Amino acid sequence: MGDTASGQAYLDCIRRRREEILARVDAALARSGRAVDAARVMAVSKTVGVDEVVAAIEAGYRFFGENRPQELIRKLEGLAAREGLAPVRFDMIGNLQKNKINAVLGRVDLIHSVSSLHLAQAISDRAERHLAEGALAAPQDVLLEVNISGEQSKSGFEPDELRRSIEELQGLRGIRIRGLMTMAPRGDNVMAHRTFAGLRDLRDELSARYPGLTLEELSCGMSEDFEAALEEGSTLVRLGRVVFDPAFELE
Ligand SMILES: *Cc1c(COP(=O)(O)O)cnc(C)c1O
């Protein structure tokens, strides 16, 4: 997008798009009897540059997601070099390799993509070390990614695997589990609803069984299925193309 990204036309475009997205979010929440502030919109900036993120901030977004640590750091450094920008939040939403954990700790509010017990333990170990050294103020907040749809290509805990591991996960002192995350199969509205409802049911089941567990966040819903996700209880939709790509067609 280069030159046009800093241009007024792009800014106008993503501003109008934001209005449209927020209207649809409100409508989906109202349809399902949920409060107007029951969900937040994250702008997934993984495919755009710092200029587009700056335009998004000017358009009103305050909450971003990245899926690669290197790109996260590039965005944070790029934004730090700009003056007068509103403060924003970044989350990590992508697959996290163990050797990249230190680069992410303390830089993001929430890691959405904790997809195995092994990874949770590795994040917790490093976070505990950072806490002891005073490099981290609080345990790292995380979401547990669950493969609700059962697709081979998807990462995340199998639901039964999560049921078996939850007590051990709860005992990890370097992390705080704030909720669950999932992705639905593409291009199938019925399956999308079923997947998001499955995530909500699993949250309800685990919350009932473990009163000490606070699973307040359900991170689900992307450009093509965020309205379905909101109707099924999503508290956090992760929107990339619909936010940043003027050519993306909202249905
Ligand atoms: C890219 C990505 C998104 C956003 O996808 P869009 O379809 O562009 O909205 C959301 N969540 C994750 C984990 C992603 O990698």
Image (tube, helix red, strand yellow):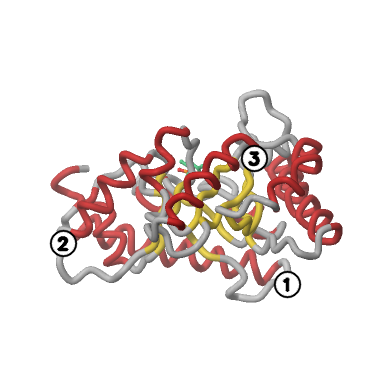
Q: Residue at x 69, y 60 (%)?
A: 215
Q: Residue at x 33, y 64 (%)?
A: 15
Dot 2: element:
loop
Dot 3, crowdedness within 10 Å: few (<14), some or many (≥20)? many
Residue 13, image x and y in percent?
A: 30, 58
Q: Amino acid at mark 1?
A: Gly
Give the mark nearest the N terminus, 1 or 3: 1
Which residue carries the number 2 mark?
A: 82
Q: Nearer the viewer, mark 1 or mark 3?
A: 3
Residue 38, image x and y in percent?
A: 62, 70
Q: Amino acid at mark 2?
A: Arg
Which residue carries the number 3 mark?
A: 184
Query: Residue 60: which quarter of the image?
Result: bottom left
Dot 2, crowdedness within 10 Å: few (<14), some or many (≥20)? few
Query: Residue 62: which quarter of the image?
Result: bottom left
Residue 167 versus residue 11 in the image, above or below:
above
Residue 172 versus residue 57 in the image, above or below:
above
Side of 185 relative to 48 (left or right): right
User: Residue lying furthest front in this view?
Assistant: 132
Q: Nearer the viewer, mark 1 or mark 2?
A: 2
Give the mark nearest the N terminus, 3 or 2: 2
Q: Residue at x 40, y 37 (%)?
A: 100
Disc 1 to disc 2, C-alpha distance: 41 Å
Dot 3: element:
loop
Dot 1, crowdedness within 10 Å: few (<14), some or many (≥20)? few
Which residue carries the number 1 mark?
A: 33
